[in-house]
Image (cartoon, coloured by chain):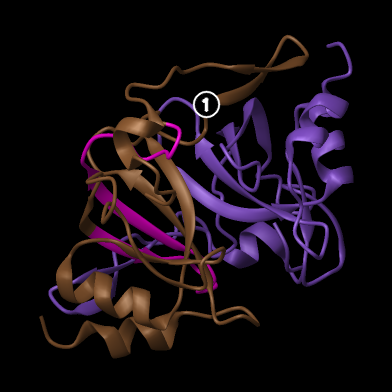
Chain colours: A brown, B purple
Amino acid sequence: MNQPDNDVLAAVRFDANGLVPAIAQQHDTGEVLMLAWMNRDAIAETLATNRVCYFSRSRGGLWRKGETSGQVQHLKELRVDCDGDTLLLLVDQQGVACHTGRRNCFFRAVRDGALVEIAAPLVSPEQLYGEHKHG
Amino acid sequence: MNQPDNDVLAAVRFDANGLVPAIAQQHDTGEVLMLAWMNRDAIAETLATNRVCYFSRSRGGLWRKGETSGQVQHLKELRVDCDGDTLLLLVDQQGVACHTGRRNCFFRAVRDGALVEIAAPLVSPEQLYGEHKHG
C-alpha cells in the first residue's frame, strides 16, 4: 500500500471533536452491524493493520474492536462518502458485533406501533467480556 | 399505528445538538445509501408519513428527502441500536440517494493505496436540482 493514509485523511471532514462516524457493514451479506466513531489515529491504524480500530467516546481513547471480546472486525474496504463526513467500513465480523451478544446492534424495530426486539443474543455479555465492558 | 413516536423517542439518545445519526439502507438489496441526521421532529414526521425526513445541519431545518430532487425515500422500517444513539432506516429509495447523482454516497474507496471513485453518476446534479442544492 502506498501510504493511503494521507489520501484518505485529506478527504475526511472530522467534526469539532476530531471524529467521524463509521458504519460497519458485513462485506458479503450487506448486514449493517454497528456505527462507531473514528479519529485520525483510528483510521490510520485500521488501514495499516486491516483490523478495525475505533475511537471510544466513553473511554476517550482508541478502541481496537475485539481486543477484549475477541469479536474482531477484519477490514475488507474503507469507503468515504460524498461530503467526507461519514465512513463505510466493509468488514468481516468475527462472531458478534454488539456488546449485548447480538450479531448487530440494530435489534430494536418499530413494528405495529411499538419498539420491539427482533433479534436475541447469540452469546451472553458475560461470555464476551467477563467483567469488562467494551467490544 | 399506536403513536409509536413516544416509544421510539424515549429510546433515542440525542446528542448535545438534539440530533442522532441515521443510516439509510435500501431494504431489499442491503445497499448502504447515505448517513444523515435526525432530530425529534424529523423522526416523528418520518414515522407519521413513512417518507424519510432528516434534519439538515447546514440549513438548520427539516429536510424532506426528495422534496427538491424527487428522490424520495419511503420508510420500510426504523430500527434503533443498542445504545439508542444511532438509527437504521430501511428504505425504498426512489432514483438516487446522493446529491452527486450517484445511487449511494459511498462512491470513493481505498484501493491499492489510493482513494478512487468506484461509481459514476446516474443523473447529473443539474437534472436533480436545477439551481437548488439539497436532496
* Residue at (41% x, 82% y) in the render: A40
Element at label 1: loop
Above or below for A59 versus A134: below
Say which of A24 and A52 sits in front: A52
**Crowd tier of the residue under label 1, counting other residues whose Cα lies within 10 Å: few below 14, some 14–19, many 20 or above:** many
Q: Position of residue A63 (x, y in %)?
A: 37, 64
Say which of A131 and A32 sits in front: A131
* Residue at (45% x, 33% y) in the render: A100
* Residues shaded magenta: A77-100
Q: Is residue A123 left or right of residue A10?
A: left
Q: How many marks?
A: 1
Pointer 1 indicates a residue of which chain?
Answer: A
Q: Is residue A95 visible?
A: yes
Quadrant of the rendered image containing residue A53: bottom left
Q: Position of residue A39 (x, y in %)?
A: 45, 77
Say which of B134 and B7 sits in front: B7
What type is the residue that disc 1 sits on? Phe
* Residue at (59% x, 25% y) in the render: A108
* Residue at (34% x, 57% y) in the render: A89
**In magenta segment, residue A94:** yes
Q: Which residue is mark 1?
A: A107
